[in-house]
Amino acid sequence: MVEIETGYPLSKLTTIGTGGPAAAFARPESLASLEEVLRWAEERELPSVVVGLGSNLLASDAGVGALVLRLAGDLATVELDGEILRAGGGAANAVCLHRARAAGLGGLEFASAIPGTAGGGVRMNAGAYGREWRDVLIDALVVDADGSSTVPVSELGLSYRHSGLRPGQVVARVRFRLEPSSPEAVKTKVAGLLAQRKATQPTNKRTFGSVFKNPSAELGAGRAIEECGLKGHRIGGALVSPRHANFIENGGGATSADCIAVMAEARRRVHERFGVELEHEVQFLGPLELPPL
Ligand SMILES: Cc1cc2nc3c(=O)[nH]c(=O)nc-3n(C[C@H](O)[C@H](O)[C@H](O)COP(=O)(O)OP(=O)(O)OC[C@H]3O[C@@H](n4cnc5c(N)ncnc54)[C@H](O)[C@@H]3O)c2cc1C
């Protein structure tokens, strides 16, 4: 049986660096151990939640009464089979991209600035620069306490930063279809995209990526918040990034409650000014919610 730790700090599992203890935490390293630990949680009526790199995650300061999983070992490896890249759900996007480039395969460059995992990307249908997971994904091996099944991309319900995965479902493996390219061409494209990122986003700060989904193609969440004069607005240790208003930075000692307070203020002000209800993109873990408008 995979080792189960109690009270593991979620702040160590999130890029923003906030969050209280997890009731239970495990790092399954194989499909069998993942299935086993999911059954263990179900027998105890404990919900299970998988985290990737915690790069779009805000975890409650009070912690979470759930089994939190981080996929490791076989569930985080990357292999190539011709133009198909097979990745464990816990494989970092950076590793997938590195392996693809070394093999002379392109198509994943858009993911270079998305600091998550292959499985987290499915859950969020992560995307950038006009491409998203559903454009490269073939299928995903989805596991829950009842077993596992391979689900084709067309049945994953992927849309803008959304999937049809149910709570408790874990993406254990994925297959991406890539295309021939030269390592040099991939490298050049990635360098260009990363330079764009660096110029417009707080890449050297602790954040959880986009706070809110863009309300429409005409009105980005960042521009709406910026036009409310909120860049740099700080509550406790959390602040609206002075670089990009749809990011919240941990300015030192932030709590998740501080982040929620900043989000609530941004949402209130945008609603007042534009009549738009911002929907959070960042995923909540544990008892967290935004006050009603
Ligand atoms: C600096 C920065 C820049 C970013 N830029 C972008 C961007 O350009 N585009 C974009 O789309 N996102 C961006 N993000 C957000 C984030 O990186 C993506 O949403 C990413 O796909 C989340 O992956 P993760 O593995 O870290 O998931 P987590 O943040 O750990 O989890 C997010 C959600 O996915 C679920 N999940 C995680 N792993 C699995 C799994 N194996 N199976 C099932 N569910 C799972 C979690 O339970 C949670 O609900 C950015 C974040 C940062 C910090």
Image: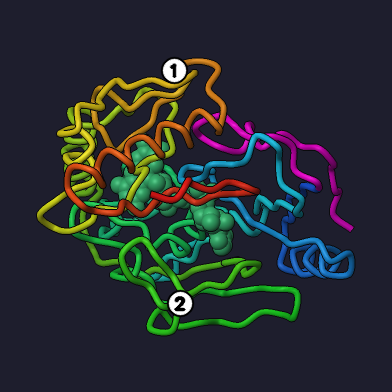
Residue closer to the observer: 169 or 198: 169
Residue 145 position, x and y percent, is: 75, 74
Image disc number at residue 215: none
Q: Amino acid at mark 1?
A: Gly
- Give the labeled residue for mark 1: 251
Residue 60 is left or right of residue 240, and the answer is right
Of all residues shown, which one is farthest toward the left? 218
Confirm whether the magenta stretch covers residue 20: yes
What secondary structure predominates along the stretch shown in magenta?
loop
Query: Looking at the image, which is closer to me, 190 or 287?
Result: 287
Q: Residue at x 80, y 61 (%)?
A: 46
Is residue 285 placed above or below 159 in the rendered structure? above
Tell me, yes or no, if residue 201 can be seen here.
yes
Element under disc 1:
loop
Per the image, the residue denoted by label 2 is 139
Residue in the image at 23% along x and 61% along y: 131
- Location of the N terminus by quadrant is bottom right
**Closer to viewer: mark 1 or mark 2:** 1
Q: Does 196 appear above or below 173?
A: above
Whether 69 is drawn above or below 259: the answer is below
Residue 269: in magenta span? no
